[in-house]
Amino acid sequence: MLTIATMTPAKAGSYYKENYYDEEDQIEFSEWWGKGAESLGLSGQINDPKIFRNILQGLTADGQIKLRAAPPKGKEARAGTDLTFSAPKSVSMAALVGGDKRLIEAHDQAVNRMLKLVQERYAETRINKRIISVDNICVAKFLHDTNRELEPNLHTHCLMMNLAQGEDGQWRSGTNGNLYHRKMFLGALYRNELAEAVEELGYEIEPQNDGLFEIKGYTREQIEGFSDRHQQILDYLETEGLDDTTENRITALFATRKTKQKNVDRRELREQWQAEAKKLDIIHPLPKPSPQKVESNMQELVAQAVRHNEERTAIFTSEDLESFIVSQPTGKSFDEIETVIKVNPRLIRRGDRPAKFATEESLEREKMTVAMMLEGQNKFPAITPEKELQLPENLTTSQTVAINHVLKSQDRVVGWVGVAGAGKTFTLKTLVAIAKSQNIEISGFAPDASSAEVLGDEINITTNTVAFHLLENREPSTQRQLWIIDEAGKLSAQEAYDLLQKSRLYNAQLLLVGDRIDFALR
């Protein structure tokens, strides 16, 4: 799992004090990482608290030079962004209780691969209000082995400093919006990378829900025996009435955090773990020379990802393909996945950070969609031609403009883009009443059944899903039709194309209704 949190200098400074490994373990528990760290002369273990504090404050290691501007008055400084990568519980048990320290190295390599990806794709700064890509990050890594209940929990805090060096050599603040937007994606990639490494060590894995996995050989009861923290999260979800999703678990994780215990006797803690393992009848699974790997046909998986994405949109990113591919562990490393994507013969590649792709089919469909929209201009008489209707006085100016836009339009496709709280339901009800008075047949459609049902109940019209409507084969009506498509920004490119084709056959006008966020994601 991956969690992300913005850190102040005071909060981030606590990591330096949480050294979870003693010298006898001979494990490097902290490390400077990234091209940004190298440029600042930082490498190896984080063994000087003064240097660490200076970097958190946006200063050079010696504290002599300011590297970023001060925050606006009244705002607390942002030291950096904490990306915490947590291994599955069974990996923690095999590594920390079972004693296979190779799994710690596998976890660390998976974390480093994700940091490399962040540095290559998502490192940014802001210059004159413009977001500019850079090729460097400065990260302080801290490897921890327990959660707040002192249970085995292998995880790494990657404190990505609020620093970025531009092409001009000047240091500035970094931006972190990219990371928050890609939290689920990076978490899935980390799990895939770790799963591949775990299998290479000889363990078998068992894929779980939401792209998670566990090492085969531990029962659910044994895993839960070391998961009091996990149970706290589940209890919180139940109390708050939240679904058990990865996103909600992350919310619960932060909501139920306790202060970490200090001055823990490491040997005593390991003895407690061994005693608990014995009580749970745990026999740690042994790696095999040639394990049964969960391995996918990568060429076919990439082909499926291409088909999935080209149906949704004309142009998609490498990230879109990768997200589809790693929704379950593949048995392949991220580098192997990237290689197969690069050689896929159907993909037309443009740009970078991340790369954008299309196929000949998706581009041709896009051209035909645009052509149909242009062909549909000035094809209908206005619903209320010349006269200005007396609209309800309690409509806002923007609602009045939206209604008149539909009533006066002569185009096949009309669009409404709104925001939450803009009064969409009231505006639609007013429009429907006027259109019905002009003998217009109104139908409503939405991408999913629940949205279609809500639309029908709210504005009192017949509704169904877009998919059902496209499959339905009924005789065209002689009555003029207006089709209201709610949440239109969630339609796939193929659905939008098919809707346009069907509207031509039925001589219907389309009113596409959605919000800015959904349309922006198209």
Image: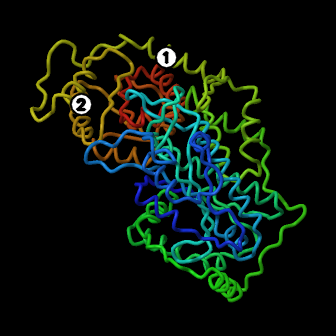
Q: Nearer the viewer, mark 1 or mark 2?
A: 1
Q: Is residue 40 above or below residue 239?
A: above
Q: CA distance from mark 1 to mark 2?
A: 26 Å
| Quarter of the figure that contains the N terminus | bottom right
**Which numbered circle lies on residue 431?**
2
Whether 59 is drawn above or below 230: the answer is: above
Q: Quick one: SS at disc 2?
A: helix
The one of 488 and 279 positioned closer to us in this rendering: 279
Residue 361 on image: x %, y %: 65, 22
Identified by mark 1, the residue type is Val
Task: Give the residue type that dot 2 points to.
Answer: Leu
Which residue is situated farthest in the right direction here? 289
User: Which mark sits nearer the N-terminus, 1 or 2?
Assistant: 1
User: Does residue 396 lie above or below 34 as drawn?
Assistant: above
- Neighbourhood count class around disc 1 (C-alpha, 10 Å): few under 14, some 14–19, many 20 upward: few
Tag 1 residue: 370
Q: Residue at x 48, y 16 (%)?
A: 372
